[in-house]
Image (tube, rainbow, N blue to C red):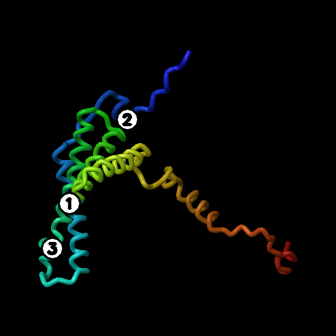
Amino acid sequence: MSQPPPKQQPTPAESNGSYEPKPVWINTGFAGAQLGGAGLLVSAVTNALDAHNRGAWGIFTRSGGTIAFFASVGAAFGFTDAFVANMREKNDAWNGAAGGCAVGAVAGLRARSLPAACISCVAVGAMVAAFDSQGGRLAGDGRTRDDPIEREARRQAFFKTKSSFPMPESPAVSQSS
C-alpha cells in the first residue's frame, strides 16, 4: 500500500482561501519602465564608449534598440507573470517560470533564431522558477534577521585565524596569572 505524497505548505494567501488578483497592465507598465530605464543606462554607456559624430542623440539613434529591447523584456515578464498568476489564482514559482520563459523567448527572437528562443525560454524559465521557489531572495537563509549582537559575534568568529600551532604565552602574561 503506497501512501499519498505529502502536500506542500500553502502560501499565506492560499491558506485562508483568498487570492488577490494582480493588476496585469500596471505590472506590465511598471516592469517595462524599470527595464526600459536600465536599457537607457546601457545605451548611454554604449554611446559614451563608442566613437561617432552624433553627439548625445546617439543614445536614441544608434543604440535605441537596446532601450526598446530591455523595455520589451520587462513588459513581457510583467505581463506573463501577472496573467498566469491571475489565471491560476496562485502565487508560486510557476508564474515566474512562465514569465522567465517569455523573457527567454523575446531574447531568442531578437537573435532571429527559433532554437535560441526555445532554449532561452527553458533556461531563463528554469532560473526564475528556481529563484522564486527558494523564496525570491538573494539574502540567503535568513541570517539577516539575526540579532545584531549574534551577527557581530559570528562575523568576528569568521575572521579569527585558527592556527595549527599554539601560540606561546609571553612571560608577562604568564606571571600575572
Position above or below: 119 against 14: below
Q: Nearer the viewer, residue 118 or 148?
A: 118
Q: Which one is closest to the eye, mark 1 or mark 2?
A: 1
Most extreme residue toward the top, as rendered?
1
| Mark 2 crowdedness (10 Å alpha carbons): few <14, some 14-19, many ≥20 | few
Q: Residue at x 41, y 43 (%)?
A: 133
Residue at x 29%, y 43% (from the top left corner): 98
**Residue receiving disc 2:** 12
Mark 1 nearby-residue class (10 Å; few <14, some 14–19, many ≥20): some
Q: Where is residue 134 shown, x and y percent of the image? A: 44, 45
Does the CB distance between marks 2 and 3 fall below 8 Å?
no
Q: Amino acid at mark 2?
A: Pro
Q: Position of residue 39 (x, y in %)?
A: 22, 65
Identified at 13% across, 82% down, the residue is 55
Q: Is mark 1 in CB contact (under 8 Å) with mark 2?
A: no
Q: Which mark is residue 62?
A: 3
Which label was assigned to residue 69?
1
